Image (cartoon, grey):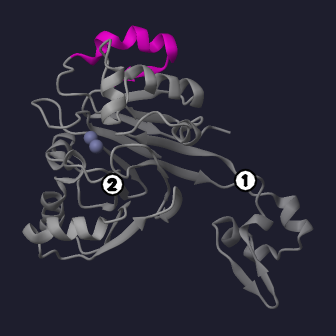
């Protein structure tokens, strides 16, 4: 199972009842956080989800509303006696930016590992997660992320027999082990049918609506997308500051056909995002104006 919480829905600055946009995923005891603006750890506390099992933090970019909450969160994870290393992923400059922020959080009881993104598309595996980072279009280097939980195929007895795999290895191979049997290297694909549909959540904020977003969000279980502006006449402003309107987000969703889309990263001036949703749903019916703390529990399809 994959648990998702959209911890906040604000852009630029936190407001009462609206924390800055960040998302947490939980799967098999390992948590993953995307972005950490001012107040993200309070949003986490309000939700009642522990920061201690966070194994990975992905940063979209280094504007303050996406990273300024990091030193406090790192200290809180230290106070919770975390000792396992924490992986940080983000655009080039990550180690320098985090190093500067750590001037005020120098001593931590765990190590930080840095993965700096430099290609337009990169895939990283961490615990149960397959993390796809893709470059988007903001006024600084910015990435969106797809978080997937892959699902292997079913065990296929006929395949295992045809490949003459000794029965004693079947269950280990089914669990994903690679086994050396004398001269032969046995791999899980020898006993498994085709991969089944896994789970996927795609996240992007702070970008113009570029086609790569729809590509990664294709048939996602959940697509969380920036909607900075909902009011009429904000298209020029969205273009100038490299953000998106609700309608631009909905057109990406229409292209990608996720099961649902949640809007987030609202401009502080936008107090009631629901007001614009009728028009948004004309473009993509499964659109929702998300609120802080929204949660979704995703499970593999029954088969
Ligand atoms: Zn932002
Ligand atoms: Zn930004």
Tell me: 132 left or right of 151: left
Whether tag 1 and tag 2 are in contact, CB under 8 A, the answer is no
Residue extending furthest bottom? 182
Instruction: Check the picture and name the quadrant holding the C terminus.
Output: top right
Asked if 298 appears above or below 98 in the picture, the reply is above
The dominant secondary structure in magenta is helix
Q: Is residue 98 above or below residue 59?
A: below
The magenta region covers: 272-289
Mark 2: few/some/many CA within 10 Å (<14, 14-19, 20+): many
Q: Visible in this render: residue 114?
A: yes
Q: Mark 1 falls on what kind of element?
A: loop
Q: Position of residue 194 (x, y in %)?
A: 76, 52
Q: Give the image location of residue 108, x and y in percent.
A: 16, 74
Q: Is 195 left, or right, of 61 in this rendering?
A: right
Could you give the CA–CA distance between mark 1 and mark 2, rounded to whole angstroms? Answer: 35 Å
Q: Which mark is residue 262?
A: none
- Residue, x 23% and y 28% (percent of image)? 267
Picture coordinates of residue 210 (x, y %)?
Answer: 50, 37
The image shows residue 137, relative to residue 222, as above or below, that is below
User: Disc 2 marks which residue?
Assistant: 59
On whether residue 287 falls in the magenta region, the answer is: yes
From the viewer's side, name the closer residue of 6 and 276.
276
Residue 154's mark?
1
Q: Earlier in the sequence, mark 1 or mark 2?
A: 2
Q: Is residue 204 left or right of residue 13?
A: right
């Amino acid at each position: 199972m994959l648990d998702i919480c959209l911890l906040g829905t604000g852009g630029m600055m936190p407001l009462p009842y609206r924390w800055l946009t960040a998302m947490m995923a939980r799967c098999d005891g390992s948590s993953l956080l995307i972005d950490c603006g001012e107040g993200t750890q309070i949003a986490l506390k309000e939700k009642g989800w522990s920061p201690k099992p966070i194994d990975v933090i992905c940063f979209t970019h280094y504007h303050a509303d996406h990273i300024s909450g990091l030193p406090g969160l790192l200290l809180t994870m230290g106070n919770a006696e975390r000792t396992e290393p924490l992986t940080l992923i983000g655009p080039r400059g990550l180690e320098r930016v985090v190093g500067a922020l750590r001037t005020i959080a120098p001593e931590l009881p765990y190590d930080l590992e840095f993965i700096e993104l430099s290609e337009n598309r990169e895939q990283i595996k961490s615990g149960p997660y397959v993390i796809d980072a893709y470059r988007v279009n903001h006024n600084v280097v910015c990435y969106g992320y797809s978080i997937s939980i892959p699902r292997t195929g079913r065990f296929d007895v006929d395949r295992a027999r045809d490949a003459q795999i000794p029965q004693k290895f079947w269950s280990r191979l089914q669990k994903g082990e690679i086994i050396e049997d004398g001269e032969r290297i046995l791999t899980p694909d020898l006993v498994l049918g085709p991969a089944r549909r896994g789970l996927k959540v795609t996240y992007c904020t702070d970008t113009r609506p570029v086609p790569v977003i729809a590509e990664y969000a294709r048939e996602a279980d959940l697509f969380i997308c920036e909607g900075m502006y909902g009011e009429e006449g904000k298209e020029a402003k969205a273009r100038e500051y490299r953000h998106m309107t609700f309608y631009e987000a909905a057109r990406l969703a229409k292209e990608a056909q996720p099961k649902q889309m949640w809007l987030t990263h609202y401009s502080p001036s936008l107090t009631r995002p629901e007001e614009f949703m009728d028009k948004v749903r004309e473009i993509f019916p499964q659109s929702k104006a998300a609120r802080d703390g929204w949660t979704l529990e995703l499970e593999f399809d029954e088969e």
